[in-house]
Amino acid sequence: MKRIYAIAFALVLLVLLFAWGLLFYPMDSRLPSGGSLEAPSAEHWLGTDNLGIDIFAQISSGFFHSLSIGLATALAAFLIGGVLGVAAGYAGGRTDMLVEFLINLFLSVPQLPIMIVAGAFFGQSSLNIICIIAAFSWAPIAKQVRARTMSLRKSGYLVLARSYGGGLWYLFKTHMSRDILPLLAISSLAVTGRAIVQESSLAFLGLSDPLAKSWGLMIARCTAFKGIYFTNFWTWWLLPPVLSLVLSTLLLRLLTRALESYWLEKE
Amino acid sequence: MKKKILLLLCSFAVIYLVNFTIPRLMPGDPFDYQSAAAGEESSTEMTEELKEYLRAYYGLDKPFFTQLWENIKANLRGDLGYSIHYKQAVSALLLERLPWTALIMFSALGLSLILGTSLALLGLRRKKLEGGLYALLSLLGELPHFLVGILLLFLVAARVDWLPLSGAVTAFGIYYSEWDWIEDVLLHALLPVAAMTLVTAPGFYFTARASFLSILERPYILAAKAKGLKEGRIRRHYVFRNALPPIVARFFLSVGGAIGGTMLVENVFAYPGLGTVMREAVKYRDYPLIQGVFLLSTLLVLLSLFAADIINAVSDRRRGGSL
Amino acid sequence: MKKRKLFSLLLIICLALSLLGGCRSHVNAPAVTGEESASTADSAYTVETLKLAGGTDWGTPSPYLHVSRGPGQAKMRLVFASLLEKDERGDLPWLAESWSFEGNEYTFTLFEGQSFHDGEPLTTEDVAFTIDYFREYPPVTNSLGVGDGFIIENYRIVDEYTITITVKKANADTLSNLGSFVILPKHIWEKVADPYTYNVPDCLVGSGAYMCTGYEGATGSYEFTAYAGWVNGQQAAERILFVPVSDELLAFENGEIDIASMPADLKDKYMNDPDIGFVEKADDMGYKMLINFERLPEFLDLPLRQGIYAALDRQSIVDNVFRGMGSVGSAGYVPVSSLFYNENVIKYEYDPDAAKELLGEKGFGISLLTDDSADGISIAEIVKINLEAVGMKVTVVAVDSAGRDDRVNKGDYDFAIVGNGGWGNNPPSYMRTLFSDSSKYLSTSPASMGPRGYSNEELTALAEGQLKETDFEKRKEMFKELELLVSQEIPLIVLANQSSYSMYRQDYYDGWMKTYAYQQAEQNRLSYMAR
């Protein structure tokens, strides 16, 4: 439990830092506010990029871009995975077969190629990116939930409750949610972290929202800059987005794991 | 098994159809995309007549279902079509690129398997080490491939002068022997493979660890221990051999993720594999090439999944017999 | 036991796949290296090798197989020669030693003794064959037109070296069009029924000063070797190599390549280096903003467009996005540094207050389409902020280049920012497809597509008229008149032009040049000739 608080505290600190950067830091994340490639200074905390845009401001706005994409994706995966998983596990029969097929289909396609094509096809808006990543995130959740529901369905009290004529929603609310919701929540949290990584991968390939100051895009721009290897520009242009990405995914991962083990212990 | 095969075929059909449809629905077609960045512009532009001519030549003016049918027929003959951007048979293009991707991917997967399994074995023997190892690897496994690649590129390759920054071989290199050439290829592959391995190995570690632990609890191991057999002998003969199938299955299950990872890492190191060509193909709306790359990766993934299923089934049956 | 077998099988597969990768590309390596050791004896060339940054696959350098972009075309044109070439001032003999024209008849006389790379002589038979063949199968780079638009009526072979070509209707660009199609060897192509898939070594037997002796698509490496049978002058380098590099600048610093483009932010460092020479591509890249008048007919009202010009701080685009390398766009479209620039065009100053007055209180809400390149997005951001400062509401829409082109072609935009190269080309023939009502939509590339829903008879008359004028000075005057009119009428908003530089080590080779028509030194075959 302590561990969860510690990690959550670190995450909150991170959020606060970037919120401050977004709201009170005087530099704009879109427009040049200084010379090209200025080294970090009191004015520009992390220096500027090749267009003279402040890097800390970009990182801050990138954090909320990434986080909102991650959370939205997780929510979508939570809903789709939860509904399909419960439905398949509970109803069985044809529904189950169909859902199982869908799960297997989405688990077996090579994700990145299809994301590249879909990203180019649907256009590079944040909403489309969320849809695409969510489409590939719900299957593992649904699989877990389905298995869990199936085992629950066979358990004594549920069979009993059903024989009394309880509807699905009632059964879920009173008997199953206690078992399934934590599982769903934890898996969805894991999706948040993974979605952030996937969005940055797509952005690195130039397939995410080009208007958002996303970290992947910053990394792509920096690595494409000619002569980046024999100057020290990369120390303030490349490292901040890379480290922010690493830090936030790791913190999310740690949180997921801590919650997982906490839940397992409680069981 | 029959159900598995049926599922596989259905998946393939769905993916094939999606793969055929999506590129054609993308905004822009291969001939419309004309504007270009500085230094790329063509001084003579395509007129509408020329575009029409080329659309007709590549059969893109036909109705959708005719195109689909002809595409299926051609694919069944083993003809993947003709790249519009590169003006080359797609199969020839893929054959040129696939070996590089395969080199990176299978070396990385192979290395990950060995590394992950050895670390798991090490962890079993040294309990103290295990806690740290577990934490470290579970973090490493969460990082995106391309990020690790970039870090290696800037922190390692750019700092030392014996490591190349990009490419697969030295251009117009002069080799005095076969070994020279192999050394060159390995040197170029080193960082991409390292980036992949760092991210993939943790998965193998966890699979191997879980597998070892579950085997150690099996009655026959306890029996062997009770018989007073030596630890080393038990490990080699019973644990390792019985724990291997899930790990090997993991190898095949990882192919799907590894293809994506390889494509990203290739873009970091400008490695001439499928990933770089896929990006170009999407940029230029080169339908046949997009389909080709896609078909190839799908086949690879589905076959690997199938292989994993077979391994699991066989080992299940054997376990059923031996227990 | 089975497990071990499985494991070793796995390893074998790995190894086999890896070796497969090796073998294929390995075949090419010795072929290239073999030639290197064979050279050095001949010192007729200025330098032994010229190395350029490669790494991108621009296709096989053959007329039907190259990629339809500048670098692909340039490589093909090294291997295949056309009748004429252009230098700093004008036309130059290339395969044709002399030429003359009268009315619709153009007569070319070839150099004697020129042969194809396989030793077969090049004669007017081949020229005639090429015309017929291109009429039937248009090549990737096509200056002759397609179908009914094919510009040649017929030809007459006078003798082995002289041919008279009759065009349907001569105009100011005809000589340039006839001079620029590349000549195919008849003895090879007469047997080819589908040139678009004819991908065998024979397709590289060309007529140019250089032979393609090495090409590997996957790595984007090319090797060109001077052809000894070339009669019109001497090649500058024995070999030209396009080498894949990870970082162009790093490679240039290390001497791995001989010419590289110079990033704006490192300009000072290199400008002060006396050993380094430059070729400037002045104002060659340009950004304009198209207004879709079909959607926004209000903007057909001239003061509104003047208001837009006054609202835009275009100097800040040059300063911030181009890092100072460029100029504010001329409202007459042809950039300031061009031979054809008219200094009398109206210059619109940045004046937000005047803009507010001109645009009135309407508060237009528009979407602004741009591509997803870093520069395109930065420019869109600046335009957005400028326009919102004067009371408009702007939503930026960024899609990838192919998507952007698609939307512009279909007219699916309000305002669109389009950037393209070639603004420094002479004569500025792009003015016709931009501003003539009758030719405007012929070419469907956003770069040369004029404003939608706008027509102007006066502009059309001038834009079409210049094409018929074969006198150089008179044509230039017509262009200048056209520019003045464009700056007054504002059919589209010209944002800014970007200049770029190629830099090279002067002490090694300083033959890099640009022609009066085209500014890319690396893509110009005269850069590779001793002159």
Image (tube, coloured by chain):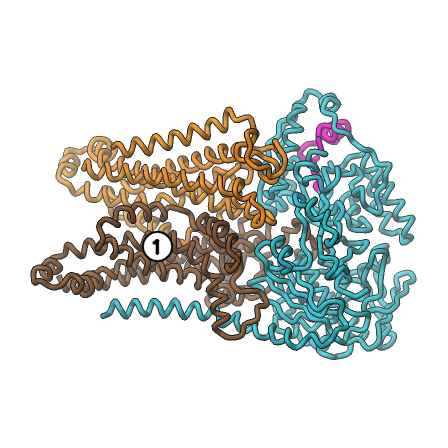
Chain colours: A orange, B brown, C cyan
**Count of numbered badges drawn on the protein:** 1
Farthest bottom residue in view: C120
Amino acid on which disc 1 is placed: Ala
Using the rendered image of the protein, determine whether residue B241 is visible from the camera's viewpoint. yes
Quadrant where the C terminus of chain A is found in the figure: top left
Residue sitting nearer the eye, B319 or C189: B319
* Residue B289 included in the magenta stretch of the image: no
Which is nearer the eye, C399 or A64?
A64
Residue C295 belongs to the span the image colors magenta:
yes
Count residues near mark 1 (Cα–Cα under 10 Å), then give few for <14, some for 14-19, many for 20+: many
Q: Residue A240 at what x, y percent from top left?
A: 49, 39
Q: Residue B47: which quarter of the image?
A: bottom right
Q: Residue C14 placed where, x, y %? A: 39, 67
What residue did someone put label 1 on?
A: B201
Q: Can you give x and y, in whole percent of width and height, for residue C457 in the image?
A: 83, 39
As drawn, the residue found furthest toward the left would be B227
Query: Regarding mark 1 in the picture, which secondary structure is present there?
Result: helix
- Residue C110 appears in which quarter of the rendering? bottom right
**Magenta segment:** C287-314
Residue positioned 38% across, 29% down in the render: A12
